Amino acid sequence: FFLSNCNRLQLLLFMYPTSCDTFVALPPSTEGQRIVFGKNSDRPCDEVQEVVYFPAKDHEPEEKVECTYIEIEQVAQTYAVVLSRPAWLWGAEMGANEHQVCIGNEAVWGKESVDGEEALLGMDLVRLALERADSAERAVDVITELLEKHGQGGNCMEDECGFTYHNSFLISDRTEAWVLETAGKYWAAERVEAGYRNISNEYSITTKIDREHPELRTNAEKQRWWNGKAEFNFAKVYSYSSTARIQAAGRRYCEGRKLLQKSEGHIAAETMMEILRDKESGINMEGMFMTTGSMVSVVPKDQNLPGVHFFTATPDPEWYSTPDRQNCFGEMVLIKKTKLRMLFCARKNAYCLFVQERGQKIVEKMRALEKQKLAEMEKYLTKGIEDATLLVHLFTDTVDEEFSIYQSESSTGTIRFINVVNLC
């Protein structure tokens, strides 16, 4: 029999878990006094994910902001942000702001019903928090306040398939990280001050709850999910007991934790990139749903040093190396959307070459460019940046370097990690 694109996608979503994975490592797990953040965004394989920049801006009283589905009140000032987002929506899968707050979200499902009515998407909440929060904990406040006022819901795909979910978030800044997991308007949050943490498509906060919705436990009692006497375990109380999706997410969560543990004490940008490239664990996802964008951030605890943020803006971080594009908040000149789409199509075509000799040459050259850019990053992370004007065109210059590699071997292209340096 034949299925429409929408029905086929619904069938695949039912049969196989969709996924994203987000990671953070803090001292003493990292090299130096740095926080390392990373995320793979797993979305429909033909969906373009673009990297966009929005400068800080002052807003008029009573001004509104049009999110993906609904309009809400704007704040007096929004911070500069760089985002990786599906091209069709307002929000973002992941990103960073001028205060070195980094956020990635995950789809989660549980006993609390998912609202299909249009409200704020989890991806809208990522962008809103980055635009409004100057710390990781403040981002928790922003998200939970917006949840209480506007709720979360709406289709999370461009078509009309009705793909909906709750959201979890991993949020970091220069000093700490927070895990925020939601079930409708209810939520629990866990502070992470050292070591490492990761999230997948399952609830992971158990009994260590540092903040919570005031009615989180009473709602669980009312629904008869918790008797009010046993130790309260958020994941156990609010999760499904077992589904194929939950089991698969649990496996990825465990494998991701093992990969972090393997490099404990010397986790760096390169470490996080290799974790995001790992196919055996399922972290680098393939298929109709695949890894369509990746992000790695390195943020020194020293306020005088810039943070560095890498984005791929294209699928599958394993096949391509990671040239970075660097620039400063406030003076960033990003590629036009048309050029990003050209890169997306070029890289998609180049995928076919990797089994050929030409493809291997492209990989070698891209790896060399990645090594060069990582060395530049290290210089900025340790010595800072004396003249910010030198970085104004580094973002677009690196794109041109990438194009030249593809043109030298073929008429196609690919991309890897874009590097953005924040000078604020």
Image (cartoon, rainbow, N blue to C red):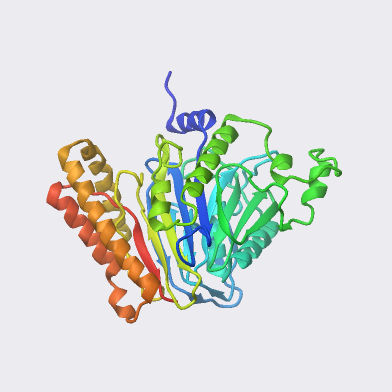
The answer to whether one can see residue 339 in this image is no
Residue shown at 47% from the left, 52% from the top: 39
x then y, percent, for residue 41: 45, 48
Q: Nearer the viewer, residue 393 or 251?
A: 251
Q: Is residue 159 above or below residue 174?
A: above
Tell me if 316 is positioned left or right of 123 in this view: left
x then y, percent, for residue 112: 70, 41
Residue shown at 39% from the left, 51% from the top: 273
Q: Residue furthest left?
A: 408
Q: Residue furthest front?
A: 265
Q: Nearer the viewer, residue 118 or 172?
A: 172
Q: Nearer the viewer, residue 369 or 56?
A: 369
Q: Residue furthest top?
A: 1
Task: Tell how many labels.
Answer: 0
x then y, percent, for residue 219: 80, 46
Q: Is residue 68 above or below residue 21?
A: below
Q: Is residue 332 above or below residue 353?
A: below
Res 70 quadrant in image: bottom right
Residue shown at 20% from the left, 47% from the top: 362
- The quadrant of the image that shows the C terminus is bottom left
The answer to whether one can see residue 348 in this image is yes
Q: Nearer the viewer, residue 20 or 299?
A: 299
x then y, percent, for residue 414: 26, 49
- The quadrant of the image that shows the N terminus is top left
Tell me if 341 is positioned left or right of 227 in this view: left
Tell me if 284 is positioned left or right of 127 in this view: left
Tell me if 393 is positioned left or right of 57 in this view: left
Res 132 quadrant in image: bottom right
Res 385 quadrant in image: bottom left
